[in-house]
């Protein structure tokens, strides 16, 4: 092999090596500057003997979020959490189901809490019980284990506000903020048109909770256990949502009602995110 051929072969081998090195450099840069992503995760922890508590972690944008939002649905609390093709699923509707894109911000992670395995229906009295609070505390410990440097915000809707407030009371300064939507603030006796009758939050002094709180309510909420007249006198930062009165063919406490902020769900969620993030927020929504 002559000198020219040797030089040409050396040139080709050197060029190939340089190209390979460039590929490695570009791969590293791509890894460093590509947003971190994880799949949805269904998490189950043992909370009591023969009882488990499940949580659904929505796909976070970062492994170390500044804030974790714990969502506590209303109604029975039993929303049937599952995963399908890596995506979060709930068999039963809940307020937060359609708010994923608004609530899941870049510096936040979102957990959705299901009812414990031994409960088909989390009544008001069950939500106040020591067993339920203990189940939720175990869930929070799991959240803190996964995200030890993140602040915890508890957000709940309707009957779930009872769970959230009693959990916040038990955790104290471990909770950075509490958000209650369509809260059940007073006691109501059973009646033919009275769903989920019980003491609501009447036995708990909300003002005694030291963490920042935000209350959100609809001015035309027709659900018998959460009239705006119970909400109005409370002197805690709040958002009042106006809008049309919805009555035709819609259960006053169910999906599509003002109790669920029908048509205003994302607007409400955005203002809550603004409040959580320390940004300017609106105390009233038309």
Image (cartoon, rainbow, N blue to C red):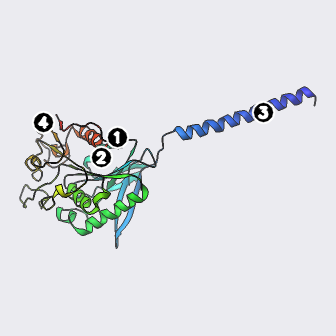
- Residue labelled with disc 1: 101
Q: Quadrant of residue 238?
A: top left
Q: Earlier in the sequence, mark 2 or mark 3?
A: 3
Q: Residue furthest bottom?
A: 49
Residue 191 picture location, percent across and down: 6, 59
Of residues 200 and 256, which is closer to you in this image? 200
- Please give left or right for residue 120 compared with residue 248 in the image: right
What residue did someone put label 4 on? 244
Task: Name the secondary structure under disc 4.
Answer: loop
Q: Position of residue 159 (x, y in %)?
A: 19, 55
Q: Badge 3 is on which residue?
A: 14
Query: Could one spot residue 186 in this view of the protein?
Result: yes
Q: Earlier in the sequence, mark 2 or mark 4?
A: 2
**Gap between marks 2 and 4 measured at Cα:** 22 Å
Residue 61 locus on image (x, y percent): 43, 44
Say which residue appears at 34% left-offset and 40% top-offset.
101
């Amino acid at each position: 092999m002559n000198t020219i051929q040797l030089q040409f072969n050396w040139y080709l081998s050197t060029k190939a090596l340089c190209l390979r090195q460039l590929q490695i450099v570009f791969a590293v840069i791509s890894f460093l500057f590509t947003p971190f992503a994880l799949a949805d995760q269904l998490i189950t922890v043992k909370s009591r003997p023969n009882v488990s508590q499940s949580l659904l972690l929505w796909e976070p944008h970062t492994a170390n979020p500044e804030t974790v939002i714990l969502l506590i649905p209303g109604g029975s609390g039993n929303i049937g959490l599952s995963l399908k093709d890596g995506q979060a699923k709930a068999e039963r509707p809940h307020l937060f189901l359609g708010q994923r894109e608004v609530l899941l911000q870049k510096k936040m992670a979102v957990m959705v809490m299901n009812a414990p395995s031994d409960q088909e229906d989390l009544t008001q009295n069950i939500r106040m019980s020591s067993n339920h609070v203990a189940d939720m505390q175990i869930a929070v410990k799991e959240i803190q284990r996964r995200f030890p440097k993140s602040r915890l915000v508890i957000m709940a809707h309707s009957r779930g506000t009872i769970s959230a407030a009693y959990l916040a009371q038990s955790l104290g300064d471990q909770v950075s903020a509490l958000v209650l939507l369509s809260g059940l603030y007073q006691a109501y006796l059973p009646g033919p048109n009275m769903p989920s009758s019980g003491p609501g939050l009447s036995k708990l002094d909300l003002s005694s909770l030291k963490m920042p709180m935000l209350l959100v309510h609809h001015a035309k909420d027709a659900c018998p256990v959460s009239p705006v007249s119970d909400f109005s006198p409370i002197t805690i930062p709040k958002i009042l949502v106006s809008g049309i009165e919805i009555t035709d063919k819609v259960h006053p406490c169910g999906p599509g009602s003002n109790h669920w902020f029908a048509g205003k769900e994302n607007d409400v969620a955005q203002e809550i995110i603004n409040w959580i993030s320390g940004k300017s927020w609106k105390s009233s929504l038309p």
